[in-house]
Amino acid sequence: WSPDRRSAVIEETGNKKTLYNFQTKQRSSIPSQWERFSFNNTGSTLAFQHLGGTTDTQWLATADLNSGAIKLLTALGDRTYAVQPKWSPSNNTVAVATVPISGNTQQMIFIKPDGQYGTQTVIQGLYFNGQWSQDGKWLLYSTADPDQGLRPKLWIAIGEGTQAGTSQQLPFSTTSEQCSFDKNTRRLICSVP
């Protein structure tokens, strides 16, 4: 869904993908190689992974939904699993990538809309998955702890400014998908297994 709830990418059987605008009732076919979608804050640009048949044709890319222009941002190679298209509400970050450092640590990298690397920070755990607060001030993410049977750990990181990426672990074990920010971004509501 786009943040304004006007458009969504609909995936149907047979790997058929459609961009549907609920306001104008327009539908546009999307190439089957496009995966893992994220809209910018106005819903006018779509970030995605272009997954071609070989590692040479796998890219993080954006599509301008008004002009149809496609921009290749950075090659993914064989690391498609490590890059998550996730537009920040401020539009300063189009995706978050993780790169292994050692057995239990990764480098988290914010990728800018021009494909350049932005803020980089070291995080604890494996299998990063995150979501932005509505105002973009926070990035809530979870990782799995290999020393505790891949039990999930929940973290909150500053999302913008000079301290971007600075993280603090939250005191309960759940994944970021099980949480939601309230509309004022002051509280976090989570389901804990």
Image (cartoon, rainbow, N blue to C red):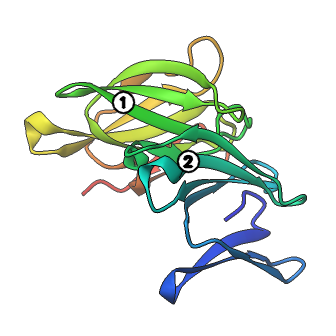
Q: Nearer the viewer, mark 1 or mark 2?
A: 2
User: Is residue 107 placed above or below 95 in the rendered structure?
Assistant: above
Q: Nearer the viewer, residue 50 or 55?
A: 55
Q: Quadrant of the N terminus?
A: bottom right
The reply to whether residue 47 is visible in this rendering is yes
**Label 1 packing within 10 angstroms: few (<14), some (14-19), many (20+):** some
**Of the image marks 1 and 2, the number of the one nearer the N terminus:** 2
Q: CA distance from mark 1 to mark 2?
A: 16 Å
- Relative placement, left or right, of 180 versus 45 is left
Residue 158, quarter of picture: top right
Whole-percent x, y for residue 35 in the image: 53, 62
Mark on residue 59? 2
Residue 134, quarter of picture: top right
- Relative placement, left or right, of 128 versus 130 is left
User: Is residue 44 placed above or below 94 in the rendered structure?
Assistant: below
Single out the residue that lies furthest toward the top. Answer: 162
Residue type of the residue flagged with mark 2 = Trp
Label 1: which secondary element: strand
Q: Nearer the viewer, residue 6 or 54?
A: 54
Residue type of the residue flagged with mark 1 = Val
Q: Quadrant of the C terminus?
A: bottom left
Reading the image, the residue beneath label 1 is 99
Whole-percent x, y for residue 126 in the image: 26, 38
Question: Which residue is painted at 34% across and 32% down in the image?
Answer: 170
Residue 169, quarter of picture: top left
Label 2: which secondary element: strand
Mark on residue 115? none
Whole-percent x, y for residue 58 in the image: 51, 51
